[in-house]
Amino acid sequence: MTDPQTVLEQARQGVAPASWRVYTKRRGKVSGFLRGSSHDPDPLLVITPDGTVEYRDDRTPLDIVRFDDLAGVELQVRGQSFSDSTRVNISAWLDLRLRNGEKGKWRSASFGDDVQVIQGFLEAYGAHKALRGV
């Protein structure tokens, strides 16, 4: 994978390769002020053919997933409703099995409710596996 900072810079400048998926959103002025991140660049998630890089704010370390480090990925979904409501809250994330035997959980910190983000991760990981013959 290319250097994570380079990936983010290319995405911010709008020169990301066509094979990358770039997700960004405007940082809310009120939430940015309350978190002390109002002057930080907007949140950014980039899914490349080799992995993901997510920038949340200047105080939070980058969240990096390298597909070469993964032995498997499993989609998890949980729904919750209340007896007096017809509405169901859905939460989705990915359970990651790393090649070194460790396990992890991936859900975008800034785009967690966007199912297209999880779909993008799964598609990129599937393509990565197919191209590598894993």
Image: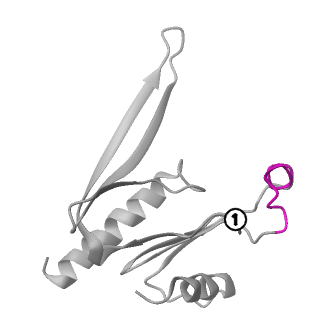
Residue at the farthest left position: 133
Magenta stretch in the rendered image: 30-39
Indicate the position of residue 98 as horizontal and vertical percent values. 26, 64
Indicate the position of residue 127 as horizontal and vertical percent values. 27, 76
Residue under label 1: 59
Q: Is residue 117 left or right of residue 40?
A: left
3 above or below 71?
Answer: below
133 above or below 38?
Answer: below
Indicate the position of residue 34 as horizontal and vertical percent values. 83, 49
14, 42: nearer the viewer: 42
- For the point 58% across and 84% down, the residue is 5
- For the point 84% across and 62% down, the residue is 38
- For the point 33% across and 67% down, the residue is 123
Label the magenta part by its dominant secondary structure.
helix
| Colouring chosen for the image of the structure | one colour
Q: Residues within 10 Å of mark 1 (few under 14, many from 20)?
A: few
Examine the structure image and report whether residue 26 is included in the region drawn in magenta. no
Indicate the position of residue 30 as horizontal and vertical percent values. 86, 49
SS category of the residue bearing label 1: loop
Q: How many marks?
A: 1
Q: Quadrant of the N terminus?
A: bottom left
Q: Is residue 44 left or right of residue 106?
A: right
Residue 134, image quadrant: bottom left
Q: Amino acid at mark 1?
A: Arg
Q: Is residue 40 left or right of residue 129?
A: right
Examine the structure image and report whether residue 34 is included in the region drawn in magenta. yes
- For the point 40% across and 48% down, the residue is 93
